[in-house]
Amino acid sequence: MTAEPFLLLRDIHKQFGAFTALSGINLDIQKGEFVCFLGPSGCGKTTLLRIIAGLETQSSGAVLQNGRDISRLPPAERDYGIVFQSYALFPNLSVADNVAYGLVNRKVPREQINQRVTELVKLVGLPGSENKYPSQLSGGQQQRIALARALATSPGLLLLDEPLSALDALERVRLRQEIRTLQQKLGVTTIMVTHDQEEALSLADRIVVMNHGVIEQVGSAMDVYREPTSPFVADFVGKVNVLPGRIKDGHLHVGTFALALQQAQGAARDVKIYLRPEDVLARPSVGSNATFPAGDPHVFDAVIEKIEFLGSFCHVHVRTQALAPHKLIVYLSLNFLSEQALAVDSALKLRLLPERLRLF
Amino acid sequence: MEATLNALARPVRQKTHWTERIAHLGLVGIAVLLLFFLALPLGAILIKSVENKSGELVWIANFIDYAKTPSLLGSLWNSTWVSLLVTLITVPLAFAFAYALNRSCMPFKRLFRGITLIPLLAPSLLSAISLIYWFGNQGVLKTALQAFGVNQIYGATGIVIAECFSVFPHALMILVTALSLADARLYEAADALGTRAVRKFFTVTLPGAKYGLISAALVTFTLVVTDFGIPKVIGGNFNVLATDVFKLVIGQQDFAKGSVVAFLLLSPAVLTFAVDHFVSRKQTAMLTARAVPYRPSPSRRFDASMTAYCALIACLMLAMLGMAIFASFATFWPYNLTPSLKHYTYGLIDNEVAEGFVNSLKMAFGTATIGTAMVFTGAYLLEKTKGASLLRAPVRLLAMLPMAVPGLVLGLGYIFFFNAPSNPLNGLYHTITLLTLCTIVHFYTTGHLTATTALKALDGEFESVGASLKVPWYKTFFRVTLPICTPALVDIARYFFVNAMTTISAVVFLYSPDNKVASIAILNMDEAGEISPAAAMAVLIAAICALATLLFTALGWWVDRRTQAWRGGAR
């Protein structure tokens, strides 16, 4: 991170009357990076994007792009392309005219415009659709055209405001991969706003998790998932078991466990333990060659209470003496369940991965 | 730290792009127009009402003076009871008609609906003229009227009957909308519980249409109180507020008392406006997006009786128009009924009204073009541009205000304001330009609401996309917004045109002998006893309005067809 960041946000604060939409936002974005703003609705992520676009004005703070202070510039004097959830394609203009919309204004010769349009329409995978109208295209196709229109003027920054939310599940997954491929091919710095954690995890170089107008954590997908720095992030990104525990004498006490952990130092206090469903290993209770070694203090017995079928994997709800009265959700593959003939009321052995526990 | 504090004290302000300054300038223009042609004239009435003849401040002395004049108080009472009576007759009749249109499977619905719109195409006094031919001193059915114990049609009787006809379409439109908002699931629930038809009507239908009924009653009352043409033509010696204003201001030049009456006319309109605003908010909340529209199921007896009822109303409407047409072609009523074009040729030319007709057309074209442009630009600048935030609330208010101002009051305000010798705009007085501007302002709100609705239906991000692509807003306006909104534009233009052709109330104060308009010419001919040419003129206006409506509909259809390619299945 030695290079000068492409986009700098400094102390951004946004007030709507008595409501504080954003406060103390500081963020550096490198050239060519794909960054996702992730958070629940109302967390300020869209407001932040609109401030970067100049569609809203921050109450205080500065925005610098490519070394230029753009804090007070109107949208027309900034350098970005934007794609909205609603596509916002001009319905009365053909696909070609939509894509060429920003080019026509720049006094580019007609021939060059046509060439560029053909190139872009091909780039987003819809060659030959130049003469169609938006209403003749599917949602996913319309969003591809909106993307082509935003990229037509080769902006330095691409802003995506929940571009996939209006699409059906299949189209969403397909288009998000296309966006990623396209972004890497063009190397354009991209910011995408989303409330869909799966989208953020699969796309972004870095994720900015936001809540109540502040940034909770900035990090790679793996960082945010594996090492959330706040309970909110742990809870919002991925599924998590929350258990009450107590730190005393350098040990974490939870249920019948007393775990000697690096994190368990310091004064005695109550803590909340965050445990991902996949951070619990499972083995059959009896009659298998692959059981846990005897005497492992992290192994405990459990009984299946409910199986939530999710496709190739299942959320398995278990109860256990070791953590009673709290129940646990563990993530098991369908193969494992059927191979071991596990069903409701089956017993199994589980092992905690103590190094994966997060304490807050 | 100090820097942060400073920043908090003074929020960051975005630099204004020069293209946005154009938008702000446009908004200032609209604000200035509405200020000079709406707010200041109304303010002039306020001032006149607290001044005596020599311009000294006398506070409420004029109002007390008014209350001490028995003849004027009589008019107040007359206006009130006549309007109430018309409301009590029209609203139930219109409700039944709307009920038939919405809740029965009767045939010819579109035809019936179309016939009830006829009164909108002519000045309101067409029905008064027709009544004179039916029941007047030389009327064909005068004896029938007397059999009912009514001595003559001139006076309250005539006013009530004529007003019922002219306000019927207004009440009907509101009630049709109210009844079409019904949720079929409520009826299904009632059926499932074994509810009888009468109980369903009183527990589901009426409460559902409650707000529509309130609003229809208020609108009817206001229209009748503020109507000038009908009482003038058929009122005889029966005085009402609207005719008083005219006599006081034009006849006696008593501006003080005139402005007091204007206030009295303004109050029901303002009340209607306030209640309607409140009611429409309630009503939209009533119908959720998940409501299932009601579909009537055929029922032979009910459908037949509804058809009979609607046919009766439609026949009465046609009789009104038909008599005016017939009489306008009769050579010499009632002695020689041979059809001739005499009244259209000699009658109108003798009265120099051909010129008035041309003036009317000029005014209607002016209103339709300038008015539509002004209304749409204003609505666009309010809805889709940013900045100049101090200007927005006042302009919004001014755009909604004309709905609450009766034409007579507006016209009166124009006299007070533009006729003042000290006003530099005095030169506009008595010109077609002023008549046109007055008419635009008079009918501004409906156009504004139509444009706003159309603009709100557009994606709110068009302007943002345009800005991100560095295309100025006015290019997006011409290339995208305007083409998409053409159907709304056609609608607004048609509304302006028809109303400009038929309006009397505001312009009656503003015309001069040099630039009479057709609708005023009817009044003058009627006053001179030239009732046949008056009828001819009214019919001519109705014909032009019908033709214009057809042309506008055709234009709308043509636009729709040309844009079919991109509107796709959405329409």
Image (cartoon, rainbow, N blue to C red):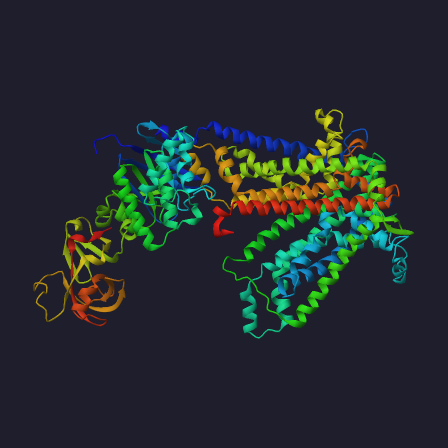
Residue placed at 59% from the left, 69% from the top? Answer: B297
Q: Horizontal placement of A347 versus B73: left or right? A: left
Would you say residue B68 is visible in this rendering?
A: no
Please tell me which residue is depicted at 8% across the width and 67% down the height of the picture.
Answer: A289
The answer to which image quadrant residue A108 occupies is top left
Residue B215 percent across, percent down from the top left: 66, 53
User: Residue most toward the right?
Assistant: B335
Quadrant of residue B164 within the rendered picture:
bottom right
Spot occupied by residue A292 in the image (x, y as percentages of width and height) = 10, 63
Q: Is B252 left, or right, of A68 in this rendering?
A: right
Residue A182 placement, left or right of B246: left
Q: Note whether B39 is above or below B142 in the view shown.
A: above
Q: Is residue B288 above or below residue A218?
A: below
| Camera-nearest residue between A234 and A155 | A155
Q: Nearer the viewer, residue A189 or A332?
A: A189
Query: Which quarter shows the N terminus of chain A?
Result: top left
Residue B189, position as x, y percentages in the image = 54, 70
Q: Is residue A79 visible?
A: yes
The spot of residue A266 in percent (x, y) is: 18, 48
Q: How many numbered discs, if any?
A: 0
